[in-house]
């Protein structure tokens, strides 16, 4: 990374009313330049024949605060549902999101077989592993509709200390959320209002989707954070494979909305010899500088504090010096960071018509 | 809309038309999620469908409760996959015996609108976006002839159903060409508890059994592409088809 990109960022502390008016940093790696715009101007960077791929995962109420059988306070943050019905999760000690994760007390000692009790539901710890024994696999005491009802009653959205109040479930859903697979909001899609999306569709831009089980973005523990993101489940529908094939055939570009859509598309392609194939799978693919992107031409993403791993992913789409200049200008211009913050579009020819 | 393997969400599925429709759609191969306020009723409906070999899941929810909207939509999708059909069947008459407008408590009107109009709006909003992405979806509003005829005493209910009918028309216009369709069905007079609450001295032999109406509505759902999106249709017209 050519320069310090963390300086000067302010966090968006609460969802804003008019998503279309949020800032959009447009980076055109082919032209080697960037410009400032608004989210509602996205269509100026897209052409008929392009395809926009969003992640339609709904966001779980993945934070469960409860107690051990010995009465010690514990928070369980669900990361992913496994195929066998158990969940992988991270354990936190007493307190809640108001305390920065890195300042949170460690969880009480928890061993396989222990029971964790929440409001109206309990789980049994199957395994505990990882640095500081905070990565757990748990199994709940019910299944099916009874489990989903209980999770939605007991759980809250995962949130972090930069947000100013308790988030409701509707604050963390995208405008096209379907199956609840995401531990945290796939937030790049959040500002895409339907007036914008239907306007794109009317202009001949294809809309497509994947479902990707976005996991937890932070644990506060550097040793665990170094393991993130963990392997994540995805589903690429047939309609998306054909939309991308048709876009390619007509010279259109593929814009992935969010790092999770990138991981699903590139992960699916990587596990099938470079060809995008429909179906479900799991990917541990890490995209970064020098990654050979097989599906996505560009990305629409939030301004995520420009942490090293996020910035590394963006370098698969544009060279570091251009990104560094663009990010510095955005920070200077007062762009806001994090899940309710402003956005970046990195797409070849994004500025061709400006 | 082909029903086999399709995820369907029916509100007010604990009894009456909702219960009958849940059975009918499950028999036709749909993967059904039913919601209702009363746990015992909605669970009994899901159990009965499963005993017949169908797939059904019960969620306890009040459609007027805004905190229940995303939990209901997401739990349903977790259980049966993306929801392709929503049937807004849950409904309230408001105060019974049904009062004249001059005697209607404002709070009762608000409650009727919350259940019969705002609830369906919220749930549709939470589900229809994903339907547009899939280019596949059907939203069915259950209405009443009280939405077009002005019956004394039916003020709160009648305006709520008129609003629901119109909501369906506007949804349909806004999502024209997206593959997401809407229709409103007037089921006609049925032999249900709601009918008995509204008109206790009705001659029950003149009322349609809910299962007969449910079969017609199921047919309408299967052949929804024959119904103009946004249209208001009487179930009786589909009796002989």
Image (spheres, rainbow, N blue to C red):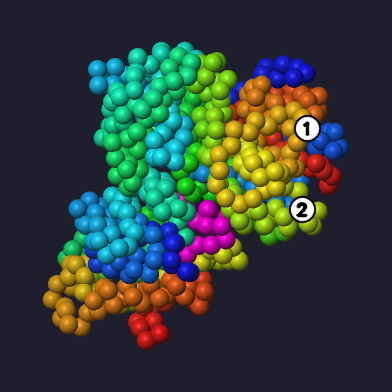
Secondary structure beneath label 2: helix
Asked whether, in this view, residue A220 is left or right of residue A31, the answer is left
* Tag in front: 1 or 2: 2
Residue B104 is drawn in which quadrant?
A: bottom left
Q: Is residue A200 above or below residue A125?
A: below
- Relative image position of residue B25 (x, y in whole percent): 36, 67
Rendered-image quadrant of the C terminus of chain A: top right
Q: Quadrant of the N terminus of chain A?
A: top right
In the displayed structure, A60 sits above or below B22; it is above
Residue A320 at x, y = what percent? 78, 25
The image shows residue B206, relative to residue A251, as above or below, that is below
In this rendering, would B11 be left or right of A82? left
Kindly report the distance in space between the C-alpha atoms of the residues bearing marks 1 and 2.
20 Å
Look at the image and give the residue range highlighted in magenta.
Answer: B122-138
In front here: A55 or A204? A55
On the question of residue A5 being in view, the answer is yes
Check whether the beta carbons of the residues at disc 1 and disc 2 lie within 8 A of each other: no
- Residue denoted by label 1: A318
Q: Residue furthest front?
A: A273
The residue that disc 2 covers is A248
Considering every residue shown, the one lying at the far right of the view is: A31
């Amino acid at each position: 990374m050519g320069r310090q990109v963390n300086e000067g960022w302010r966090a968006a502390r609460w969802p804003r009313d008019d998503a279309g008016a949020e800032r959009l940093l447009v980076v055109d790696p082919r032209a080697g330049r960037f410009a400032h715009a608004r989210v509602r101007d996205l269509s100026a960077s897209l052409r008929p024949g392009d395809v926009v791929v969003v992640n339609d995962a709904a966001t779980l109420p993945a934070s469960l605060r409860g107690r051990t059988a010995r009465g010690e306070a514990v928070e369980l943050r669900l990361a992913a549902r496994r195929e066998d019905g158990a969940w992988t999760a991270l354990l936190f000690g007493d307190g809640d999101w108001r305390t920065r994760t890195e300042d949170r007390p460690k969880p009480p000692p928890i061993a396989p077989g222990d029971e964790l009790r929440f409001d109206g539901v309990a789980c049994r710890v199957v395994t505990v592993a990882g640095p500081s024994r905070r990565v757990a696999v748990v199994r709940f005491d019910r299944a099916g509709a009874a489990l989903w009802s209980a999770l939605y009653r007991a759980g809250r959205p995962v949130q972090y200390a930069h947000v100013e109040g308790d988030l409701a479930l509707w604050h963390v859903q995208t405008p096209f959320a379907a199956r609840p697979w995401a531990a945290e909001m796939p937030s790049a899609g959040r500002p895409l209002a339907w007036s914008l999306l239907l306007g794109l569709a009317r202009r001949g831009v294809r809309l497509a989707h994947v479902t990707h089980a976005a996991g937890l973005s932070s644990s506060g523990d550097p040793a665990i954070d170094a393991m993130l993101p963990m392997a994540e489940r995805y589903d690429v529908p047939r309609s998306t494979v054909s939309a991308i094939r048709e876009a390619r055939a007509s010279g259109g570009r593929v814009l992935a909305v969010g790092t999770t859509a990138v991981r699903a598309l590139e992960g699916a392609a990587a596990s099938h010899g470079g060809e995008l194939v429909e179906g479900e799978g799991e990917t541990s693919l890490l995209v970064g500088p020098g990654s050979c992107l097989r599906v996505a031409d560009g990305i629409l993403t939030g301004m995520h504090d420009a942490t090293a791993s996020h910035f590394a992913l963006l370098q698969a789409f544009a060279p570091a010096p251009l990104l560094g200049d663009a990010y510095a200008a955005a920070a200077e211009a007062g762009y806001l960071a994090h899940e309710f913050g402003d956005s970046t579009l990195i797409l070849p020819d994004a500025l061709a018509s400006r | 809309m082909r029903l086999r393997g399709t995820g369907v969400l029916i509100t007010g599925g604990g009894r009456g038309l909702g219960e009958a429709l849940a059975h009918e759609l499950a028999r036709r191969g749909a993967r059904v999620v039913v919601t209702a306020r009363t746990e015992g009723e909605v669970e009994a409906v899901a159990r009965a469908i499963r005993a017949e070999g169908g797939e059904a899941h019960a969620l306890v929810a009040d459609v007027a409760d805004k905190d229940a909207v995303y939990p209901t939509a997401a739990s349903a999708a977790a259980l049966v996959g993306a929801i392709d059909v929503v049937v807004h069947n849950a409904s309230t008459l408001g105060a019974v015996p049904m009062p004249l407008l001059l005697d209607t408590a404002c709070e009762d009107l608000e409650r009727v609108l919350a259940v019969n109009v705002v609830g369906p709006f919220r749930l549709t909003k939470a589900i229809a976006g994903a339907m547009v992405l899939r280019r596949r979806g059907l939203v069915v509003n259950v209405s009443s002839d009280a939405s077009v005829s002005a019956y004394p005493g039916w003020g709160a209910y009648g305006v709520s159903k008129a609003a629901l009918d119109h909501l369906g028309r506007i949804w349909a216009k806004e999502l024209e060409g997206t593959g997401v369709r809407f229709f409103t069905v007037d089921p006609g007079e049925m032999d249900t508890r709601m009918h008995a609450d509204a008109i206790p001295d009705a001659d029950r032999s003149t009322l349609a059994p809910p299962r007969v109406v449910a079969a017609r509505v199921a047919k309408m759902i299967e052949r929804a592409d024959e119904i103009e999106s946004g249209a208001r249709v009487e179930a009786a017209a589909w009796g002989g088809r």
